[in-house]
Amino acid sequence: MKKILSLWGATTLIGTSTTSLVACNKNYTQKELTQLKEKKKINTVNKENRDNLEWIEPQEKPFIIVDNKYYFVVWRGNENNDWRIVKFKHFEQKEKILDKYDKYELKTSHFGGDLFIYKNGFVSYDWNKDNGTYFKSVYRWNS
C-alpha cells in the first residue's frame, strides 16, 4: 500500500509540475504565430506600409542577429503614462538607449534578443515577460 501511495504521489507531483510549466509557456505554435501576425497587421490603405510592417512576438528573438532593419516599439514606463512610439535601426549588437521619458529608459540588451525598460538605472520591465502593460507592440519594417 505504501508503494502504491508513494507512486501515486510521485505521479501526481510530476503531472502537476508539468501542467504548470505548460500553462505558463507563452510560446505560440507556428500556426498560432501566423494567425496573430495577420490579426495584428496594420490596417491601412497605404500598400507599402501594410506589406512591410510586421508585428513581432518576443519569442522570435528579433534582436539576436543584426539585420539592419528598422523597428517600431510602442511602450510606456508607467501604467498611467501615455504610449510612446520609438523607431530605431538594429545595426549593432550592444546595449543602447532607444528612448527616455521621465525616470524611464527603453534599452536593448547587450546580449541581444530583448528590450527592457529601466527605471532609475535598474531593469523594471522585460518585453519577454510583459503582459501588454508596458510594451504594447513591436513592429519590424521589412523592405
Image (spheres, grey):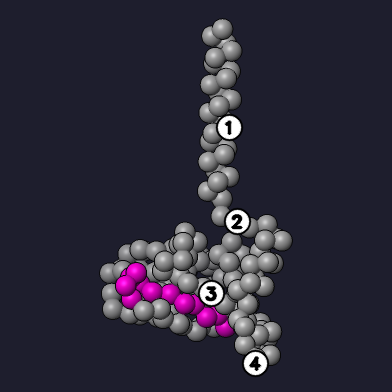
Residue at the extreme right of the image, as rendered: 31
- Residue 15 is labelled as 1
Q: Amino acid at mark 1?
A: Gly
Which residue is painted at 68% across and 57% down in the image?
29
Q: Quadrant of the N terminus?
A: top right
Disc 4 marks which residue?
A: 46
**In this rendering, is residue 127 above or below 51?**
above
Which percent across, then down, holds residue 51? Answer: 69, 84
Q: Which circle's residue, 1 or 4, is located before the other in the chain?
A: 1
- Residue 93 is labelled as none
Mark 4 or mark 3, which is nearer to you? 4
**In this rendering, is residue 112 above or below 26?**
below
Lateral position of residue 23 relative to residue 35, left or right: left
Q: Quadrant of residue 80?
A: bottom left
Q: Amino acid at mark 3?
A: Val
Which residue is painted at 39% across and 64% down in the image?
125
Q: Which circle's residue, 1 or 3, is located before the other in the chain?
A: 1
Q: Secondary structure at mark 3?
A: strand
Task: Write the start and end of the magenta stretch as one range.
Answer: 67-81
Q: Is residue 80 magenta?
A: yes
Which percent across, then down, holds residue 26? Answer: 56, 55
Disc 3 marks which residue?
A: 138
Q: Which circle's residue, 4 or 3, is located before the other in the chain?
A: 4
Tell me how far mark 4 sits from mark 3, CA to CA: 19 Å
Crowding at mark 2 (Cα within 10 Å: few <14, some 14-19, many 20+): few
